[in-house]
Image (cartoon, rainbow, N blue to C red):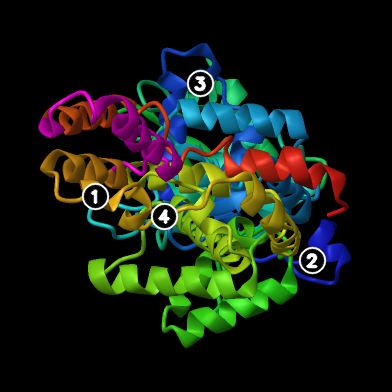
Amino acid sequence: MWLANHKGMAGKATNYVAVSFSFWKQLLNSQTDSCAQARHLTHTDLDLMILLHKICNTNGYIKEVTRHQVVQAAAEWFERPPGRTQLYVSLEKFVQLGLITIKRNEYTGKDTICLHHFKKEDGNLERYVILHPIVFSGAFHALTLAARKVYLLTAMQQGENDFIFRRLKGEASIMTLLNKNQPNQVRSVLNELKGANKEKIDYLKTATISSNHRGAENVYLALSPAFLPKLERGAEVRAPLSPPLRYPKKAKFIRNVLNELGIGELEQELHLLIETMKALGYRVIRQILRTVQIFIKQHGSFPKNLAHFIKKEARLAREKRILDLAHNAGIADYIAYKQEQREERYFEFTNRFSWYSERAISKMFKKAAKYVKDAFPAPGRFPIERYHYSESLTSEPNVQLARQKAYATKLDPVFYQELEAHMLEFKWPYMEPAAAAHWLLKRTEEEIHAVTVHEAPMKLEDFILFEVAETWEI
């Protein structure tokens, strides 16, 4: 059907839409909700129901989009699209009614909308009904809200039957559905659908009120033949909304790697992959996707929170790359002097440089190397021989223990030798050798935490960024 919507202006026809009967039923039932806002269905509520079913995928999801894109989609399909504010209000109403959930991705800032009452608990689709594209027209929008409800009610329930009927009065009746209290009001709505509308369109072939043999009044309804669904084989009833593809070169690379690794089905998350890896180089992207492939082989499924998984792997890859650059520049050993602090210090160090490009980091590290080696004590232990002041003391057990203690704790060898020299000059001549050696051991143990050669004057990243790099042009 050709309509004056954005699709029509682009030379494209507007086709049918498939709507979940269960979703429609829940929307109608909300009119009996205790919440006043829920009871009051609007034109926009009906438009939104139709729109969401048009732009969702076959699983009832609209993934990684903004609400503004939903507004743009309304203009794409409707000749008279609802306003932005009205759409936002209806979206929130649908959330409150449990018809949809909207989940914000903390990493991409995009929303994923999930339609409820779209699938059964066993995973199979709920019964859905094909609606004629007239529902996107300005003429349909111009009908009264009551007339639109009756048309949708008929279209959703008639199926292959010649007609449907509903009671005029009482519970679950037409008057209850339309919030009318007089039969004449219902007759006016039926006349509107029989051609008494601005465009003189007969939406219904049958729209009458008659009494049955018990005297109860029923309303009989049937669609006009022109609006009965005539779906051709292979015709698309959905047009899943997806954000415009950014970074086309990177998208092409990701597609190729996914197919190369045998996980091409992940292409359905292409926009998420691009958003989470857009700042990464091709080598890192390949490495992360290979990690995803390994995860799938081990667990039989994709990571539950794919964005979180990718961000974590990207951070680890980034940390490794920064550490590699530090090793290449010869400064990695100056990051952490104590083994037990290494993991924490590596995280602090790499986190400080994560905002810089690899080229800038490499340039900083290489230029800083000379200054680092001048300002920081050499990493690693000194040879045990550096703790020997006098070989004449080597045979004394307590002296050997003192030297081992100084070596194990990385005590400054110059400071330790000063202790041995003091002991030889002021203790050895006046004390028993064993007592003098014991004094040396005791003093060594006391000084372990006082003077250690491998204590950095400041954190390496602070030294590079504030003492050296601020004078360069990176």
Please state which of residues 45 and 307 is positioned toward the viewer in this rendering: 307
Question: Which label was assigned to residue 122?
Answer: none
Predominant secondary structure in magenta?
A: helix
Callout 3–callout 1 Cβ contact below 8 Å? no
Disc ID at residue 38: 3
Q: Residue 2 carries which label?
A: 2
Sooner in the amino-acid sequence: mark 1 or mark 2 = 2
Residue hosting label 1 = 392
Question: In the depicted view, which residue is nearer to us: 306 or 434?
Answer: 434
Q: What residue range appears in magenta?
A: 409-434
Residue 424 in picture, x, y percent from top left: 30, 34
Marked residue nearer the N-terminal end (3 or 2) = 2
Labels 3 and 1: the sequence-earlier one: 3
Write down the quadrant of residue 293 in the picture. Answer: bottom left
Q: Residue at x 39, y 47 (%)?
A: 343
Q: What residue type is labelled 2?
A: Trp
Density class for disc 3 (Cα within 10 Å; few <14, some 14-19, many ≥20) is: many
Q: Distance between the residues labelled 3 and 1?
A: 96 Å
Mark closer to the observer (4, 2): 4
Q: Report if residue 419 lies within the magenta region.
A: yes
Amino acid bearing label 4? Gly
Residue 380 spot, x, y in % from top left:
41, 55
Horizontal side, residue 44 vs residue 431: left or right? right
Residue 380, which numbered label?
A: 4
The crowd level at tag 4 (other Cα within 10 Å; few <14, some 14-19, many 20+) is: few
Q: Can residue 203 be seen in this view?
A: no
